[in-house]
Image (cartoon, helix red, strand yellow):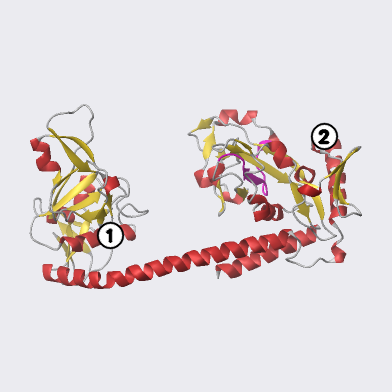
Amino acid sequence: MVFTNSLSFYYEKFLATGEVKCIDEEIPFEIPATWEWCRLGYIFSHCTGKALNGTNRKGNLYTYITTSNLYWDRFELSSLKEMYFTEEELGKCTATKGDLLVCEGGDIGRSAIWNYDYNIRIQNHIHKLRSYIPLCTRFFYYVMYLYKGIGYIGGKGIGIQGLSSGALHNILIPTPSINEQKRIISQIEAIMPIAVKYEKSQEELNQLNDSIHNRLRKSILQEAIQGKLVPQIPEERTAQELLEQIRQEKQKLVKEGKLKKFALSDSVIYKGDDNKYFEKNGNTEMNITDEIPFEIPDSWSWVRLNDICSYIQRGKSPKYSLIKKYPVVAQKCNQWSGFSIDKAQFIDPDTLSSYGEERILQDGDLMWNSTGLGTLGRMAIYCSTLNPYELAVADSHVTVIRAMKKFVLPQYLYYYFTSNTVQSVIEDKSDGSTKQKELATATVKTYLVPIPPLMEQSRIISKIEQLASIMRG
């Protein structure tokens, strides 16, 4: 029995023992004074169906339903399977017209009322609820629908995470009189078609908004990487001068032993008098006009990605451990919404010594998903403030791109690689079968990148972020 005291706290008295305890934290919302809270198990008898057992062939074959047949307020009965039921099992595992059926597994709490004129058997992942007294079962269906929607069942935080028989029995249910139950259902049924129509219109509007936002974002990024989003300022000099500074910096780092010699490159890309693009590499010169995807401002330059980076390499296959000390950034950590360490697994701490210093992720590292369908080409930027651990490394399905950050801003490169120019042909540039695509490190290193002067990179980033903020409202 549930009751309130003078301070409006909720208590439950157990009639068998006389024990009283406060259940205020269990109450999901307030109800009218004429209503009562009670445990679902006090109103309904409940049991689950029969567990599948291929070796148990006692009884006779009957069709049955499982969670894959049970949807919100409906059943899908086009292809039912059969299993053996004894007479005793039929008594326990058969649903009749008017029973409320609830999913124990799958989409926890999903419910529907069996309203057919014939009986059906149920599998063990379905709860069968049958009221002890006459009441409006549909009212309690809508309670389950509400509880699922607000996360009280199968949600996060305070609520019922699983739905065992014990958990189902103890669900607190708001209970009005049966006449009020019927009036409420009458109102819901009258309003529901309007709500469904509104929901459909809202979904169409949301899809339209998403489509517009996606198109706008693609358009903004395309304008940005083609030098059309912000004006060029002559005082900011040219990208060609910037590339020369990068070459000098790399040579200096090689002499100091801070950079491997193979990071140096003699590649120079230029536009000839005939408006064709050429790449000079040592004594070799090639016409690469067919590789150039679009024209850029005169103050910009095309360059191979490797020439503006100090490190480009796939991560390594880790030996995992349950010791949460050194996280491994995998594909699932790199989402379009950003980088998240929450999804990471961890390496065996004893194997850290096998990782070279360059493999430890640094702020601003681009992490490019380099294998698989659906995740191929997805990118995020590593941020140490989002990693509560000492350090992190990447796994073998992620390519780490470390730009020369004094000259090339990682955020600019991120916007380029997430643009339609790159993403629309990502699979064409990859190797492997239709089931397993892969971006080879050599391919990543030779990607063509349009580079503006450093200050213009910064202005482009600011403009994109400003427009994105406006689109978010």
Give the mark count: 2
User: Residue 355 at x, y = what percent?
Assistant: 65, 31
> What residue type is disc 1 on?
Tyr
Q: Which mark is residue 261?
A: 2
**Which percent across, then down, holds residue 55?**
21, 26
Under tag 2, what secondary structure? helix
Res 19 seen here? no
The reply to whether residue 457 is visible in this rendering is yes
Q: Nearer the viewer, mark 1 or mark 2?
A: 1
Q: Is residue 206 left or right of residue 429?
A: left
Q: Quadrant of the C terminus?
A: bottom right
Q: Mostly what secondary structure, the magenta segment?
A: loop
Mark 1 packing: few (<14 Cα in 10 Å), some, or many (20+)? some
Secondary element at tag 1: helix
Give the magenta range.
359-372
In the image, what residue type sits under mark 2? Lys
In the rendered image, residue 376 lying in the magenta stretch gets the answer no
Position of 200 with respect to 299 (left or right) is left
Q: Position of residue 415 (x, y in %)?
A: 67, 55
Name the residue that disc number 1 marks. 145
- Packing grade of label 2 (10 A; few <14, some 14-19, many >=20) is few
The residue sitting at 23% across, 58% down in the picture is 23
Q: Is residue 344 above or below residue 178?
A: above
Mark 1–mark 2 Cα distance, whole angstroms, equals 64 Å
> Which tag, 1 or 2, sits closer to the chain's start?
1
Residues 185 and 311: in front is: 185
Q: Residue furthest top?
A: 55
Displayed quadrant of residue 461: bottom right
In the depicted view, which residue is nearer to us: 274 or 345? 274
- The quarter of the rendered structure image containing the N terminus is bottom left
Q: Residue 440: give its label.
A: none
